[in-house]
Amino acid sequence: MEYDLKAGAKRVVANLRELAAMTSDENGAQRIAWTPTWQKARDWFAEKMIAEGATISIDKAGNSWAKIEGESEAAILIGSHLDCVPNGGWLDGALGVVAGMEVIHRYGKKGVKPKKTLYLVNWADEEGGRFGRSLIGSSAVSGTMDIKDIIDLKDNDGVPLVDALKAYDVDLDHIMEVHAEFADKNITGYLELHIEQGPVLEQTKKSVACVYGITGCERHYLKFKGQAAHAGSFPTLMRQDAFLAAAQASLSFREIALKYDGVCTVGKASVTPDVVTIVPETCTISLDQRSIDPEKLKAMFAEAHTAAQAAAKTHNVTVTWEKIWNIEPTIFDPQLTKLCKEAVQEETGEDTTMYSGPLHDAAEMAKIVPSIMMFAMSAKGLSHCKQEDTPDADLEITASAFLRLADKALKA
């Protein structure tokens, strides 16, 4: 019996709503990695895939894998993530996993055996929502993770990342073994579907787009250190106010972003002693810088250093930098890009392409295997919040386009 694309797309939406009902509350989705709600989502994924005849496994990085044997050992991998940021949206990451589940359904025990072997992976901790380090599962598989960068991380409650991962059978002494294991899978292409998380597609009245690349990112903490003093008796021009230095630097970062057509975000800020009547002695901020152009990203980073130092000097404080993480810009595989554009055009009659500002696991996978992404429009451009949404009609168009892409890749 011929596969029904429209029915498959509707199943994707139905499964997304089922997952959201299980793992959300009045504040949004709560599938934060290394928490019981995330585990609930992983269990749901495994049960659904076993019912479709897939083989299920969890690797030493916490990634959940489903497999359908094909006619050949050459394989296509579909991937995304079920984890989310705190109080996140119902579609971020989940759309890609659930669309992949529909591909498994198409070629599982009720379907026709695919030409190539099919893998679907639910990556562990794409978001970094608890410990601030994104792409943990996929960077372990790609081999780029440096254990030194994550071994000392703690969450907001002081729980070490090492302990949180061990609770889910992930040991940092063995996590990198997944890199060698990946080679045994003989994967020839990686596909990922995601929501745009921005306003471009909605503004241009498009439901879906082929994504040709992902911006690079520099992510750091900056700590400005001055001197605490009485808020009433210490003269303004004599103060060593760490907060003012951080604020001045933050405004400079915005100008740097505009200059290079990139983005700079200060998403976290904390002061000590954190008392109304005391001049701040320290102020720690995060800085996230992104650009699709590697040279512009380097220039943005260099100028941010200069701006922070200038702000520190102006306010007679010091500033130190701590690297959280960085990744180079990614341009996707030309052949898979061609197949993706074909799938979008067949579904919509239009050739729509764009690059991604947000980071995705595909950026890690592109380092070791030909990769491609597809985007669904985001209503009002909102994501990482409970208002995140995409109308069902647009979700169904996107899911259908992705199912077309998966079919093309499995037959190529």
Image (cartoon, grey):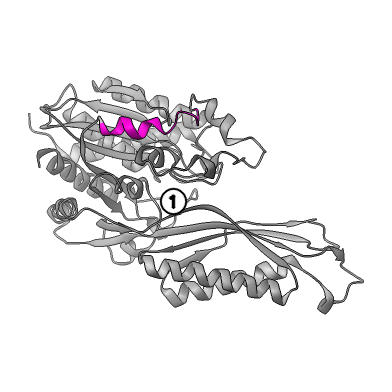
Name which quarter of the figure residue 207 lies in: bottom left
Estimate the x, y position of residue 141 in percent, counting from the top left. 36, 37
Instruction: Examine the rendering and report whether any part of residue 238 can be seen.
Output: yes
Of the 4 image quadrants, the one containing the C terminus is top left
Residue at the spot x=8%, y=33% of the render? 2
Q: In the image, is residue 178 part of the stretch drawn in magenta?
A: yes
Viewer-nearest residue: 123 or 330: 330
The image shows residue 53, relative to residue 173, as above or below, that is above
Can see residue 391? no
Look at mark 1 in the image and give the residue it sits on. 388
Indicate the quadrant containing the N terminus: top left, top right, bottom left or bottom right.
top left
* Magenta-highlighted residues: 171-183
Q: Is residue 223 above or below residue 38?
A: below
Q: Identify the image quadrant of residue 351.
A: bottom left
Element at badge 1? loop
Q: Residue at x 18, y 25 (%)?
A: 69
